Image (tube, grey):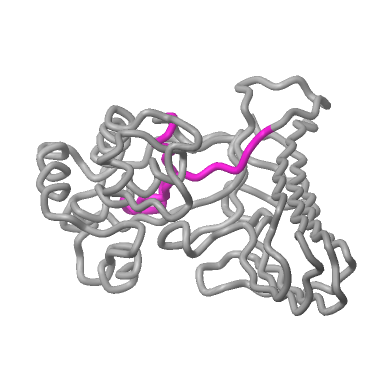
Amino acid sequence: MTWRIACRHHTLYRYSAPADASYNEVRISPLTTPRQTVLEADVVVEPYASCFRYWDYWGTLVHSFDLHPPHRELQVTGRSVSEVDPPPPSPSPVSWDMVGSARVTDELAEFLAPTAFVPLERHLGREARGLVMGLDPYRASLALAEWTREKLAYEPGATAVSTSAPEALRMGRGVCQDFAHVHLALLRSVGIPARYVSGYLHPQAEPEVGVTVDAESHAWVDAWVGDWVAIDPTNVTSVGASHVTVARGRDYADVPPIRGVYQGGPVEQLDVKVEMTRLA
């Protein structure tokens, strides 16, 4: 069943001394995709700043702005309403030869290559290849998500935004970002193109219509197995109506909600709040 979901993403920065010469990029507005339609969306900045919108190389909507008057606080609020479809049926099996064809590996080369967060290590590749023996690419993607969930315990605060997939595996714990990075490493090790997806996840499977709840940013993976298929390795589940897609890239470095530079005092307070409301 399709959900209509309202999302509010609010970020507050408070500085110890006035900040100015601030330049920022924001990726908090949902995307219209084959399974998701954005009905309305806006980003509001306080102190007021006019936002310039563009779509980046990976197809993510970016709001950029700069602030020059001195300010002690910066607030960025994204609001949206989207209609999101349930998971599609499982895809028809395709061969490994198709996934590894010259056309696919050329067109999707950037989603097979190592990155700083997702380096491709030999021992992990050997592990991944053993896990997928006898499976078609789609079933292999699910098996690798299950292995990721077995190896990592979900523990907020155990890792940082700078933690790589091998580091998270060595610690044996992490958050959704780490689950996604490990799953990406496994998929790419066996030749399945895969991309990092960020968005929002409603915390309830069957939420009451009209009730606003605290939610959070979330991360999952798109695997190319004849077509892009979304898989949530943190929960080992298909991505459905409770997942709102915001940004896609090679890893977290391509999709941070807010990135910027400024001149002024250090940040003494950072608050982030995500709220979601199922409207229908």
Front residue (pair 152, 267): 267
Quadrant holding the N terminus: top right
- Give the residue at x 89% y 68%: 48
Above or below, 210 relative to 96: above
Residue 38 point in image, percent of width and height: 72, 52
Expressed as whole percent of the image width and height from the top left, the position of residue 86 reads 57, 34
230 left or right, relative to 187: right
Whether residue 228 is in magenta: the answer is yes
- 61 or 64, which lies in front? 64
Q: Residue 201: image x %, image y %?
A: 60, 36
Quarter holding the C terminus?
Answer: top right
Q: Is residue 184 left or right of residue 43?
A: left
* Quarter of the image where one finds residue 174: top left
| Magenta-drawn stretch contains 168 | no
Q: Residue at x 64, y 70 (%)?
A: 260
Establish if 237 lies above or below 163. above
Secondary structure, magenta segment, majority class: strand
| Count of marks, rendered view | 0
**Residue at image point 39% right, 30% down:** 236
Residue 171 placement: quadrant: top left
Q: Is residue 68 left or right of residue 121?
A: right
Residue 172 vertical placement versus 165 (above, below) = above
Q: What is the x, y in percent for residue 108?
A: 33, 67
Residue visible at 43% across and 43% down? 159
Segment tinted magenta in the rendering: 215-235
